[in-house]
C-alpha cells in the first residue's frame, strides 16, 4: 500500500516509516523540515505545514492510508500554539483525506486526553475525556481525537491510538528531558515513587499503528474507536526512572517532594503564574500537570487492542533497556 506519515522524521513517525519500509510498503513523509535519513531509506518526502490545506492535500493525494503522527507535544507552552498544531492541523488532515478520497486515517492520540488528575489504574476505553485539563497538550489532543473519530463514516474509516509514555533509542522528548533534569539536579519524585506507570517501547507503539491500519476499513470493528497502547507492564515510577538513570550512568533519583500531592500541585500553580508574569518561555521546575503525572498511577487496560487488531508488545521493558543501552554505547 501507499502510506503517508505526518511527522515521519520524528521519533514515533520515524519508527512507523521504518516498519512500513521493511514490509514493502511505499512511504511518503510530510513535515516542515528535511530529513536526509528518510532519503536514504527511499522515502518520498513532502515538505509543508499542517496549517496549509493545499500542502496537506498534495501530500495525501494517491495514498491508501494516512498515519497522522505530527503534533506539538510537551507539558508547557502557549495554548494557541498547541491549538494551531494539534487541532487545526488535524482538522486540515481530515479535510485533505476527505477531499482526495483517502479511505483510512490512523491518528496518534494520547492517554492524557482522559486524565482526570487522580489515579487511573487498569481503566479501559469506556472512560470519558477529562473534564478539566491543566496543560494545553492534553486539552488540544482531546479535541483533535474527537474530530478524528467523528470523521469516521462509510467513505473513510478512522481510528485513534493512545500510546503511553513512548520511549526508546532516538527519543527526542521524554528521556532527554529526564536526563537533563537529572544532570541539573532538578529531577524529583512526588510522593513515595510507588505509584505505577506503564510505558511503551517505541517499536511496540509503531507496530500497533500498522496493525490498526491493517484492520481498518469502513464499517470494521476498529473503525471509529480509540485504543490504549502500552507495554502492558505497569511498574513503580521510581523503578522506571532509576533503570533509565542507570543506563546514562546517573545515580538513582533520591530527591523526593514528600509533601502531599496537593502541595506539589499548588507549587506548580505558583511556578506557572510566575513564569507567565515575567514572560519566561522555558519549562518551570514543576507544573500542575507534571505534579499530577508524577504523583499518580496511570496504567491502562490494553485488551481491546489485543482483541480487535492483534496488538502484542513484542519488546519487553528489559529488552528495551538493553536496546537503549546499545544505542548510546
Image (tube, rainbow, N blue to C red):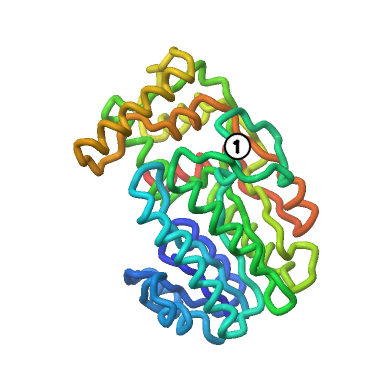
In the picture provided, is 38 more to the left or to the right than 130?
left
Q: Position of residue 174 (x, y in %)?
A: 42, 43
- Above/below status of 82 relative to 250: below
Picture quarter with the N terminus: bottom right
Observer able to see residue 208: yes
Q: Position of residue 275 (x, y in %)?
A: 25, 35
Observer able to see residue 14: no
In the picture provided, is 182 more to the left or to the right than 320?
left
| Residue sitting nearer the eye, 168 or 149 | 149
- Secondary element under disc 1, as helix, strand or loop, is loop
Q: Position of residue 238 (x, y in %)?
A: 50, 24
- Above/below status of 267 relative to 171: above
Reading the image, the residue beneath label 1 is 198
**Residue at position x 75%, y 62% from top?**
222
Disc 1 residue crowd, few under 14, some 14–19, many 20+, Cα 10 Å: many
**Residue at position x 23%, y 36% from top?**
277
| Residue sitting nearer the eye, 97 or 66 | 97
**Residue at position x 79%, y 68% from top?**
220
- Above/below status of 221 relative to 255: below
- Above/below status of 151 relative to 297: below
Picture quarter with the C terminus: top left
Amino acid at each position: 500500500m501507499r502510506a503517508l506519515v505526518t511527522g515521519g522524521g520524528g521519533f514515533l513517525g520515524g519508527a512507523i516509516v521504518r516498519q512500513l519500509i521493511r514490509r514493502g510498503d511505499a512511504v511518503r513523509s510530510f513535515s516542515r523540515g528535511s530529513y536526509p535519513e528518510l532519503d536514504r531509506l527511499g522515502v518520498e518526502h513532502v515538505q509543508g505545514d499542517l496549517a496549509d490545506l493545499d500542502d496537506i492535500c498534495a501530500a495525501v493525494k494517491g495514498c491508501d492510508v494516512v498515519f497522522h503522527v505530527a503534533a506539538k507535544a510537551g507539558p508547557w507552552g502557549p495554548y494557541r500554539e498547541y491549538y494551531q498544531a494539534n487541532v487545526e492541523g488535524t482538522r486540515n488532515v481530515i479535510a485533505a483525506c476527505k477531499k482526495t478520497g483517502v479511505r483510512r486515517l490512523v491518528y496518534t492520540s494520547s492517554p492524557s486526553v482522559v486524565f482526570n488528575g487522580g489515579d487511573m489504574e487498569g481503566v479501559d476505553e469506556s472512560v470519558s475525556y477529562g473534564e478539566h485539563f491543566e496543560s494545553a497538550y492534553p486539552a488540544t489532543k482531546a479535541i483533535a481525537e474527537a474530530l478524528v473519530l467523528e470523521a469516521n463514516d462509510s467513505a473513510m474509516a478512522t481510528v485513534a491510538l493512545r500510546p503511553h509514555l513512548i520511549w526508546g533509542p532516538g527519543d527526542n522528548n521524554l528521556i532527554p528531558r529526564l536526563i537533563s533534569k537529572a544532570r541539573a539536579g532538578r529531577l524529583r519524585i512526588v510522593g513515595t515513587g510507588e505509584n505505577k506507570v506503564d510505558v511503551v517501547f517505541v517499536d511496540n507503539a509503531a507496530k500497533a499503528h500498522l496493525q490498526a491500519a491493517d484492520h481498518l476499513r469502513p464499517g470494521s470493528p476498529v473503525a471509529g474507536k480509540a485504543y490504549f497502547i502500552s507495554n502492558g507492564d505497569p511498574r513503580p515510577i521510581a523503578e522506571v526512572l532509576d533503570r533509565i538513570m542507570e543506563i546514562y550512568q546517573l545515580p538513582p533519583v533520591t530527591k523526593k517532594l514528600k509533601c502531599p500531592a496537593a502541595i506539589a500541585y499548588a507549587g506548580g500553580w505558583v511556578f506557572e503564574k510566575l513564569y507567565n508574569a515575567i514572560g519566561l518561555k522555558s519549562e518551570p521546575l514543576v507544573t500542575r500537570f507534571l505534579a499530577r503525572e508524577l504523583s499518580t498511577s496511570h496504567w491502562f487496560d490494553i485488551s481491546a487492542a489485543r482483541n480487535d487488531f492483534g496488538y502484542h508488545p513484542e519488546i519487553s521493558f528489559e529488552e528495551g533497556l538493553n536496546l537503549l543501552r546499545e544505542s548510546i554505547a
